[in-house]
Structures are given as structure tokens and as C-alpha cells.
Amino acid sequence: MSSPSHNDAISVIIPAYNAKATIGRCMESVLNTNYAPLEIIVADDASTDDTADIVAGMANADPERVHLVRLDRNGGPARARNVGAAAAKYDYFFFLDSDTEMLPDALERFIARIPEADAVCGHYHWQPLNDGATPWYKSLLNYYMFSRQGVFEHDVFLGSAAGIRRDVFEKTGGYDASLEWGMDYENEEFGHRLVKDHRILLDPAITVRHDFPGFGKLTATYFTRVALWMKLFMERRKFEAGGPAAQNVGMASAAFPVFIASLVAVACTPWAWGPAVLFGIIYLKGYAGFFGFVLGKRPAFLPVAVLLNGYFCFVISSGAAWGALSYIFGEKHDAG
């Protein structure tokens, strides 16, 4: 990998809201890449904790590379990213979430890949920052789903770890700042606008470690985000190019509840074996590779991964059904 030059200067932009537990180590991970020239812009989204004070302290210690931008009101990550981008001085932006840690080679890998595209996304490493069954399940699943294809053209800009040319970001209009906290599809919306005229690549070699939520919060997050994603799908009629929202994975998630229901129905009629076998095959085609990946990385975790996968397939299916009904009977929006 070639050495960075002055023309490869990067502004790392981190939106932060009440992130005192993670923002310091996130920024340190960027500084520890030893990439140069580099600046870090933290857009503090009107935090009510000590986030801004932590960033200000690091900015005072390293004023050439670390900068704090305070927002006057809490508006969500889309607006915070735009404000951070407006304050940046370099020609490449790299967006990073405040609850992640950057791997040492992430920025060099981004610079090596960006000549082939207008934007380059990374993804989550298979090792989470926090311990626990749910964080390990989510990190292993995301890593496998995004890495199995190699480098591929994506249609979502994964703002938790993604870089873009400054001129492309500005030409596209940046993030839709009307998408506030809880709406959770600002990355999909921006990506869908971006790919109309530009190319996004996902490079699985670019990874960050993530602090994942626990069981209850991840359940709510899955349900909400899948419901919102389903509304976008109903308008676009298109699965994502890769990752957990790819077609085969989505079909597998939907097949699992039908598979279980068919097994239960076998007690009443032997004809239910047909649907049980069919939907069982669809489910395994989507997730068998993931189970093999878990077996290779953490063999003892496989039974837990299988149980959690079944549970979250039910959650995903419920969220998709809710999103579809909301789209049919509710207010529609522009999918971008």
C-alpha cells in the first residue's frame, strides 16, 4: 500500500450526542492510525453530558488535528454530519460514528480504494468493542454479510464508516437534515441519491469495531429499522446490493417464521411437511454460510448464534410486516 501524500488529506467527521463513554477512545483510535495529513471534526449535537468537554480537552491538547463544532440544538446525525462537513478543510471526508473504534489501516485502505469510486464504505469488524451474546452475534453477522462478496458496488452510504470525495458530497447535497433522531434511514436515503450519478464501493477490508446495544435495545432497533427499510423497499421495489438487507438474506429471514409454523402444523396435517422443507431450505440458503463463519471464529458460540438468529428472524419479519402495512395504509414519503 502506497504511502499517503499531501493530496490525500482526510477530514474525519464524527457526529456525537451524549457519547461521553465512547467519544474519547473513538478519537484516539483515529489519531493512533498515524495517518497524515489528518483532521478530526466532532460535531457535538447539543449533548447534555460531558461529550463536548471531553472533545474540547483533546482539541486543546492537539489543536492542529482535533476540532469541536457545537450545534445549537439537537437535530440528529444527518444534520450533525453536514455541519461537520461544512467545517472540514480537506478534500476527502471520512464519516465515523462516535461508538466505534477505527482499525489502524482503515484510512490507508480508503485512500487506496477511492480512485475506483466516488465513495467507499467500510463495515463493522467481527470483534465487538463490548462483550455479551447480543454484541457478538450482531458483529459476527454484520461482518460475514458484508465481507462474503468481496469488494462490491453498494447503494447505501454506511455513515458509521465511510469516505467520500468532498466535491461529490457537496454536489449531491449531503445528508437530508430533515431526517432527525429515531428516523434511522439517513444513510439509505443519501446512498440512493448518490448512486444516481456516482459510484459507491464497499471494501470489506475497511473495518471499525463497534459498541453494540444489548438484547432489548437491539430488538427495538431491528424492528424499527426494518419497518422503515420496508417502506423504502415498497417504493423502490429493490433489495440492497449486499449485506443483511440483500435479497437472499431478506427472504431467509421471512422464511424462518413460516418454517416454524409449518413444523407446528405437521401435527395436524402431514401436508405441512412440504412447506416446512421448502421454507427450511430457503432459510438455510440465507444463513448456513453465517453459521459456518461463526463455527470457524467462535465454535462454542454457535448454539447461541443459532438461537439469536431464529429470534431476530421473527423480529425482522414482524418489523417488515409492520412497515408494509404502514406503507399501504399510511402516509408515503420520497425514497430518494
Image (cartoon, grey):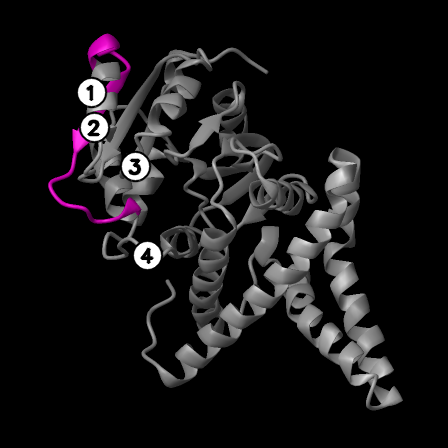
In which quadrant of the rendered view does residue 278 lie?
A: bottom right
- Dot 2: element: helix
Work out whether residue 172 or residue 18 is closer to the camera in this orientation and state it: 18
Q: Earlier in the sequence, mark 4 or mark 1?
A: 1
Q: Nearer the viewer, mark 4 or mark 3?
A: 4
- Please report the bounds of the magenta region as a residue range: 60-77
Q: Which residue is mark 3?
A: 15
Contact (CB < 8 A) between labels 4 and 2? no
Q: CA distance from mark 2 to mark 1?
A: 6 Å
Q: Nearer the viewer, mark 2 or mark 3?
A: 2
Q: CA distance from mark 4 to mark 2?
A: 22 Å
User: Tag 3: Cα neighbours inside 10 Å, few (<14), some, or many (≥20)?
Assistant: many
Q: Earlier in the sequence, mark 2 or mark 3?
A: 3
Q: CA distance from mark 4 to mark 3?
A: 15 Å
Q: Position of residue 184 (x, y in %)?
A: 37, 55
Q: Earlier in the sequence, mark 4 or mark 2?
A: 2
- Dot 3: element: strand
Residue 280 belongs to the span the image colors magenta: no
Q: What residue is shown at x 13% (from left), y 45% (from top)?
A: 73
Give the residue furthest to the right.
Answer: 270
Q: What amino acid is found at the position of numbered circle 2 in the picture? A: Ala
Disc on res. 182? 4
Q: Earlier in the sequence, mark 4 or mark 3?
A: 3
Residue 67 belongs to the span the image colors magenta: yes
Q: What amino acid is found at the position of numbered circle 1 in the picture? A: Ala
User: Tag 2: Cα neighbours inside 10 Å, few (<14), some, or many (≥20)?
Assistant: many
Contact (CB < 8 A) between labels 2 and 1? yes
Q: Which residue is mark 1?
A: 56
Query: Could you tell me if residue 242 is visible in this image?
Result: no
Query: Could you tell me if residue 77 is visible in this image?
Result: yes
